[in-house]
Amino acid sequence: MHRILIIDDDPDICLLLKKYLTKKGYEAFVAEDGHEGEKWLKENKADLVLCDFKLPDYTGLEMLQKIKIIDTKIQVVIITGYSDVRIAVEALKKGAFEYVTKPLYPDEILITIENALKARQQKESDAIPAAKKQGKKSTKPLGTFVSGVSPSSLAVGKHIDLIAPTNMSVIVLGETGTGKEYVAKAIHKRSKRADMPFVALDCGALPKELAGSELFGHVKGAFTGAINDKKGCFEAANGGTLFLDELGNLSYDNQIKLLRVLQERKVKPIGSNKEVSVDVRVIVATNENLKEAVARDEFREDVYHRLNEFKIELAPLRERPDDVEIFAKFFLEEANEQLDKLVKGFDQKSMDALKAYTWHGNLRELRNVIKRSVLLCQDEMINAMHLPQEILTPDKDQVGSMAVSFNGELPKDLKSVAEEAEKRAILVVLKHTNNNKSQTADLLKVDRKTLYNKLKAYDINV
């Protein structure tokens, strides 16, 4: 029986979720704040954590990091208000499996939990060669998805077909939610290594002190808590493909170790004097511009060039509106199957709204919106009533919060208006991230160097 911990300071939500999940066959436990949740996890085992983003003592990002330090295998689902979707996307970059938005619907929560637990099992299963699992060649795909119809999507498909048969390392670039892991799986599935393991590691979800162990393994007694020998991901993926997501979060020390493995094809587990030979194809993904990170001395140039044998760039969904309809229809079929519904499609107004919206969370956000709309729909067609209000009137609150006021005076010139608006936007996002400059730069979609220059120019001290 799977064990689930609910961390939320709302007793009504905790009671509702605990009763519902218990009824569905799960063991459910409750913690009223982050500190209590952290203590419970240190003393007990959990398969999944449902965590509210706004806790009395911690933010969702802080709690996510604490959970991953305790156990990297625990799946984490963030509960958030729809207005916080951009922050929820940041949580996904740091290793959360998914987010659900309020108001909560039990069926939606249940599906998300089931998918999270299946994903955990799938990753463990993918690490086992198909020949060992079935005794014969596997014909089951590693993941079902659909390709877009926009020129950029068609180009990605051609690149996958071109690079898959080779053993070249690949860098997949794209924002969170654009389907980077799908691309990696598609390359593996179409390669000569298809019957061997596909192992995925989210470097963004790993605390620095655990990353080396997860990548390269360790021997018993290598450090406090190393009670058994552990194989790292390189050994687990031997003969197959290793997918390293959010590579830009890897510490400098581990970048050096990674370079050595890439060059010599040998790994040395932490605490061991013996090297183990490995034959692994490496595919990495990041939402960060690694060339800029190299220029800032935050990522090793030699590692970048060693990995950059081929590059695939995934455009954000907002730049390919032609893909919205085809993905929405695919997610509709998926939701119908999950929810046992028979919704046939979208009326024109709802589809126009979906195409016009700026998808901050890309395909992942679109999938969540469609799933919730199918859940709410009692008719044959999804209409505007079934969509979140934020989709119909996008960014209204954010525009209002960033509005420039001149206290009844006329502005001096257009440049001053733009600079004032830019300064206020930076201040708003800094407040939202508790003055976290990295998160602020990410949300404003600029590199950190640009942000630092703006802070200096506008005399913003944080």
Image (spheres, rainbow, N blue to C red):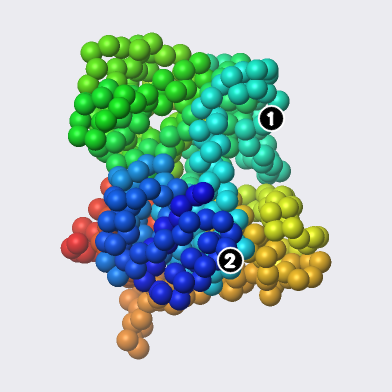
How far across and how far down the image is residue 177, in percent?
52, 48
Q: Is residue 249 above or below residue 253?
A: below
**Disc 2, SS:** helix
From the viewer's perspective, is 383 left or right of 371? right
Q: Is residue 262 visible?
A: yes
Tag 2: residue type?
Answer: Pro
Question: In percent of the image, x 46 and y 63: which residue is there?
Answer: 79
Question: In percent of the image, x 58 and y 25: which residue is there?
Answer: 188
Q: Which residue is mark 2?
A: 106
Q: Which residue is mark 1?
A: 140
Viewer-closest of 40 and 401: 40
Q: Is residue 423 visible?
A: no
How far across and how far down the image is residue 458, in percent?
24, 64
From the viewer's perspective, is 344 left or right of 448? right
Q: Is residue 359 above or below residue 449?
A: below
How far across and how far down the image is residue 100, in percent?
52, 61
How far across and how far down the image is residue 1, in percent?
51, 49
Question: How far apart are the two marked residues, 1 and 2, measured between alpha carbons?
Answer: 31 Å
Question: In percent of the image, x 33 and y 82: which residue is there?
Answer: 406
> What is the quadrant of residue 39 in the picture?
bottom left
Viewer-closest of 380 and 158: 380
Dot in front, 1 or 2: 2
Q: Quick one: which residue is furthest to the bottom in this view?
A: 408
Question: In percent of the image, x 26 and y 24: which residue is there?
Answer: 220
Structural crowding at the residue carrying mark 1, measured as other residues with C-alpha within 10 Å and reported as few (<14), some (14–19) or many (≥20): few
> What is the quadrant of residue 394 in the picture?
bottom right
Q: Earlier in the sequence, mark 1 or mark 2?
A: 2
Image quadrant containing the C terminus: bottom left
**Disc 1, SS:** loop
1 and 2 marks in contact (CB < 8 Å): no
Tag 1: residue type?
Answer: Lys
